Image: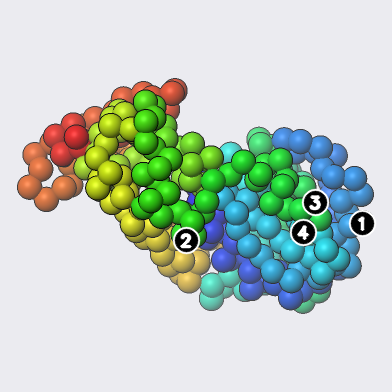
Amino acid sequence: MPELPEVETVRRGLAPVLEGQVIVQADVNRPDLRWPFPDRMADRLTGARIERLRRRSKYILADLDRGETLLIHLGMSGRMLISGGIVGDFVHAHAAPAKHDHVVLHMGQGARITFNDARRFGAMDLMATDSAPDHWLMRDLGPEPFANDFNEDYLIGRLAGRSMPIKSALLDQRIVAGLGNIYVCEVLHRAGINPARKAGRIAARRVAGLVPLIRQVLEEAIAAGGSSLRDYRQADGELGYFQHGFAVYGREGQPCITPGCAGTVARIVQSGRSSFFCPLCQR
Ligand SMILES: [Zn+2]
């Protein structure tokens, strides 16, 4: 499941071939993915110029010159493939159409963007740009981790009195948008906070410390994604998945990497999802 850094990496990889470019043809090869595509999606995309590619939480938003915005959600298995355009230092030739190539955008300068999604948990939608913040997928989202309205006072206020585990609170998209299971595990390890601790029982000073740590962990992952773009070697032009070392995620039974800590990474299940943490240095 791509998380915020992976989606941001895809956005940065797509921006040079999409921003400022006209969609000369849009192929929409089925009526739906996770949800039905919007009415006449191919017609509404064809001939439009993409003015800006942005990200809100895990959604990529392409603002069109016609006053509409295209929302792209990679879902569980969605992949964006670029061919005939530059990805990092690499130009990929057009591949033959493949199974699960559901939407193909042919761009004015010759690049082709293919949305391939074997499991079809991804989504695309079109909305008026002005009302994008009110779209049902985005209207309840909390602040972006890098935005000014996500700050120490805000997080302390949102967690005060809450009895849910801190892990669940940070995964709650209404509190902060875009954090997923992997990076919440990493943030809590770096903060030395046990994922099962009740959110409202953690000292304000430690809650405040989470804000810069969340940004730090995400920034490092985005930087790792950026290196994967510059050093592009995959044959098919696929964007978004990169090798990245984790401190605790997926490391059950291995030694904790915190300097001076002799702990072993443990795994518990919270709300049906694995939490990896060190019982010794995360309190
Ligand atoms: Zn430890």
x 46%, y 66%: residue: 226
Q: Amino acid at mark 1?
A: Asp
- Element on which disc 1 rests: helix
CA gap between label 4 and label 3 equals: 9 Å
Residue 7 drawn above or below residue 164: below
Q: Quadrant of residue 271?
A: top left
Q: Which residue is mark 1?
A: 43
Compared across the picture, whether 11 is left or right of 125 comes to left
CA gap between label 2 and label 3 equals: 28 Å
The percent coordinates of residue 56 (x first, y second) are: 60, 54
Q: Which residue is mark 3?
A: 126
CA gap between label 2 and label 1 equals: 38 Å
Callout 3–callout 1 Cβ contact below 8 Å: no
Compared across the picture, whether 134 is left or right of 48 comes to left
Q: Earlier in the sequence, mark 4 or mark 1?
A: 1
Q: Amino acid at mark 3?
A: Leu
Q: Earlier in the sequence, mark 2 or mark 3?
A: 3
Residue 148 numbered tag: 2
Residue 157 appears anywhere in the view:
yes
The percent coordinates of residue 154 (x first, y second) are: 42, 49
x 87%, y 51%: residue: 41
Q: Quadrant of residue 183?
A: top left
Crowd rating for badge 3 (residues with CA inside 10 Å; few <14, some 14–19, many 20+):
many
CA gap between label 3 and label 1 equals: 12 Å
Compared across the picture, whether 134 is left or right of 40 comes to left
Q: Nearer the viewer, mark 2 or mark 3?
A: 2
Q: Amino acid at mark 4?
A: Thr
Q: Which residue is mark 4?
A: 129
x 71%, y 61%: residue: 62
